[in-house]
Image (cartoon, rainbow, N blue to C red):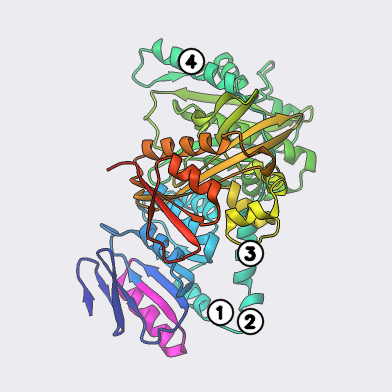
Amino acid sequence: MTVRNLDALFVPGSVREIGSLMVASSAKDAASGIAWVCQSGPVARHAMEFASARGLRLSRVVALGEQADIDCGDLLDYLASDSTTLAVMVCIDHVRAARKFMSAARACVHNKPVFIYCDPAVGESHLAYDAAFERAGFIRLADIDALLEAVATLQSAQVSDSDLMKRYRIARARLAQTPPSLPEHHAELRNALAWVQQRLSDTTSPAGHILNEDEAVSLLAHFGIPVQPRTTSTAPCEAANTPSFTITLRDDRTFGPFLEFTTPDGHASSALLPINAALACTALERLAQLTASPAGEFAAWIETLAAVSVCLCSVEAICAFSAQLCIVQERAVLHPIAIQLDVPGTRRPLAIRPYPVELEERIEWDGRCLMIRPIRPEDEHAHADFFRAMTPEDLRMRFFAMVRQPDHTQLARYVQIDYDREMAFVACTQEGDSTVIHGVVRAVCDPDNETAEFAAAVRSDETGHHLGRMLMERIIAYCRARGTRVLTGEILRENTRMLKLAFDCGFVVQPSEDFAVTSVRRVLNA
């Protein structure tokens, strides 16, 4: 059977439609199996014949062709929640719609392992693809045969102890790492953007503005990035005789800006922007020349790299950046530095939406100053304290069942969100070195931004101050502004306080299949 417009050929079996794409299930289809996603029809046929010969189960087999309509990101979104698929095998040579692909990939890996063979097409950057797949949590395999053997391994009795699952567990653990908090530079960021705008306004060159050393030092100082000016003919890294590496901003045609790290022996690693300290550590661990460095030096490197990421993500006018990073007097310092500015939009957009600092706001509330901001990965400990401050009954109202305190993996899911598809606002205060979360509201959008589902909670000892109403209005305004059509929620019928809040915020009841649950709905954009 030939599926038109996809250059895909399937052996006989059941066929169903996802959107405009035809998807085949093998004749050996069972309650669960492995999904196979590729571009080539002959490769899809080969996978089905391989599975049939070995008695293996394939839940879905899809050939995408040139991804003109449905692409790999669409399939990953579908397979992430497909109950018949236990794992996903992907065989592609390029990616379309990088931001959608990264969102779908990360969501899928949260639910099931994804294994990939990708030999990027001519003109594609291997380092950019390496960085993207690492960030998504994919397990890369050497070739198509390795993918096929992985299908067999995942359906064997030894799957739990297999190298494939060990690699998946390591990838999942890396995705859930809690990064340390970075110093906040809100006022400095505003000053930096004004400083950059002034430099661009004074520039008449069509190539933008290349910063001299003093200007580069001044810009980086806004973000607390240490710089060692050149004071002698010998560079600080050479004089210190310590391990060093070069940081270069690359602008990939598919995945946009990413960082390339190169050691003097020529080995390179990469990471998609934005990165935090945990992600920087993962990238540097792949460079053998650096792994033997003392722990203190390594920690200094990753702290500086995280600050560099904040700078590059915040100042979109930086279109070129290169610097050497080394240890001088126990500090990780940059030198020499090459930075070029150009009008925002010159470089490509990031494949992963960075932390939206523009959504932060300080307000006076009930006699105290509250910070209302998007949740951050480093909020894990504060979020754990937030749950501990809620009574068992309030937790039951929030989660529809008696629940224990969430563990690290669950907390990571709450605080490490995809800002392109999710949003969670926290109302928090700073008490010494600790963040205290008083309330949180979140919304998770579907891939097409048609519908989002909300959830909200306030500390049990802080109800009655209308904090929940303020947070609900905040998430409603955010979803409306991003074009979400409908906002929905599910509330236990006995949760009268939350039901009243929903009705006060303009929600109406819609039919629910569960008698114990009330479904509410509000149209935001007709």
- Pointer 2: what residue? 158
Residue named by callout 3: 169
Q: Position of residue 22 (x, y in %)?
A: 27, 71
Q: Quadrant of residue 40?
A: bottom left
* First along the sequence among labels 4 and 1: 1
What crowding class fits label 1: few (fewer than 14 Cα within 10 Å), some (14-19), or many (20 or more)? some
Residue 83 appears at what percent x and percent y? 46, 72
| C-alpha separation, residue under disc 3 versus residue under disc 2 | 15 Å
Q: Is residue 390 above or below residue 78?
A: above
Q: Is residue 355 left or right of residue 252?
A: right
Q: What residue type is labelled 1?
A: Thr
For the record, the magenta segment spans 39-61
Mark nearer the N terminus (4 vs 3): 3
Q: Name the residue at 50% across, 18% down.
A: 211
Q: Distance between the residues labelled 2 and 1?
A: 7 Å
Above-or-below relation of 121 to 44: above
Q: Using the numbered discs, state the Cα–Cα distance from disc 4 to disc 1 in whole angstroms.
A: 56 Å
Does the residue at mark 2 contact the one at mark 1 (Cβ under 8 Å)?
yes
Check if residue 270 falls in the magenta segment.
no
Amino acid under disc 3: Arg
| Whole-percent x, y for residue 146 in the image | 50, 73
Q: Name the residue under label 4.
A: 194
Which is nearer the N-term, disc 4 or disc 2?
Answer: 2
Percent x, y of residue 316: 45, 28
Q: Are marks 4 and 2 in contact (CB under 8 Å)?
A: no
Residue at the spot of label 1 = 153
Tell me the chief SS of the magenta region.
Answer: helix
Q: Neighbour class for label 3 at 10 Å: few (<14), some, many (≥20)?
A: some
Q: Tell me the quarter of the image containing the N terminus.
A: bottom left
Disc with the residue nearer the chain's start (1 vs 3): 1
